[in-house]
Image (cartoon, rainbow, N blue to C red):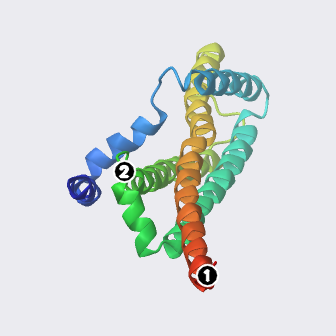
Amino acid sequence: MYEQVVENVKEIANHKNIEHLLKDSLCEIKFSRKSLLQYCFSITTAMILSYIITYKSNTVELMLESVEIINGVALAFIAIIFGTYSIFQALMTDDVIWALVNEKSNLLSIGNKSFLHWILLYLINIIINVILLIVLKCIPNDFCFFENVNITNATAFGLECIYFGFCFLLFFEMKNFTVNMYQMFNVYNSYRTLEILKSKLSELPEDE
C-alpha cells in the first residue's frame, strides 16, 4: 500500500516544463476511437458554420460576432473549471487525500492534470480569440485577400473550419474534466459518509 502511495506522490510531484505541459494538454483532444463522435460532430458543425459565414456578403462582421460568442463561452468554461476545482480543494480532508493517493489509478494526479490541461487549452483558445478580434476589427467588411474571390473564399473557409473545429472540440471534450471531477467528488462523498457513520455508531450505547 505504501509503495503505491509513494509512486502516486512521485507522479503528482513530477515537474514538467511548459512545452511538455502544452503537448500533454493537446493530448486531451487528440483523435481516438472514443472521441470519434465528438470529432465528427465538431467537424460537421464547423463546416456548416464556415460555409454560411464565408458565402455571406458580411463575412467579416459575422466572423467577428462568432469569435465574440466563442470567447464568451471559453471565459465561462474557464471560470467553471476554476470554481469547481477550488471547491473540491476546499472540501478535501486528510482522509480523502489519503484515499485518492491510495488508488492505483491515482485519481488525485488525474484530477490535477485534467485541471491544468483544460486551463491551458482554454487559455490558448482565449489568446487566439483575442488576436482574431483585434485583426477582424481592423479589416473592412469588403476586404479580399487575393485578387481571385474564389481563392479568397476557399482560404477563408479552410481557416474557419480549423478554428471552429478546434473550438467545438474543446467544448465537447469538457466531459472528460467533468467525469474526473465527478469521480473525485464521489470519493469525497463516500469518505464523508463513512466518517458520519463512524460518528453515529460511536454515539450508540454499548449494549446496542
The residue identified by callout 2 is: 106
Which of these two is toward me, 25 or 165?
A: 25
Q: Quadrant of residue 149?
A: top right
Number of residues whose C-alpha sits closer than 10 Å to that of mark 1, classed few (under 14), some (14–19) or many (20 or more) = few
Q: Position of residue 159 (x, y in %)?
A: 56, 28
Observer-nearest of 50 and 83: 83
Residue 146 in view here: no
Asked which secondary structure carries label 1, the reply is loop
Q: Which residue lies at the image location 66% right of the left edge and 45% below the top edge?
A: 67
Q: Quadrant of the C terminus?
A: bottom right
The answer for how far apart the CA atoms under marks 1 and 2 are is 41 Å
Where residue 161 appears, x then y in whole percent? 60, 26
Which label belongs to residue 207? 1
Picture coordinates of residue 174 (x, y %)?
A: 59, 44
Seen at 59% across and 39% down, the residue is 167
Q: Residue 8 versus residue 134: which sits nearer the camera?
A: 8
Q: Residues within 10 Å of mark 2 (few under 14, many from 20)?
A: some
Tell me if 113 is positioned left or right of 86 in this view: left
Q: Is residue 53 left or right of residue 144?
A: right
What amino acid type is highlighted by mark number 1? Asp
In this view, 62 is above or below 199: above
Query: Secondary structure beneath disc 2?
Result: loop
Q: Earlier in the sequence, mark 1 or mark 2?
A: 2
* In this rendering, position of residue 159 left or right of residue 30: right
The residue drawn where x is 45% and y is 50% is 114
Q: Nearer the viewer, mark 1 or mark 2?
A: 1
Quadrant that contains the N terminus: bottom left
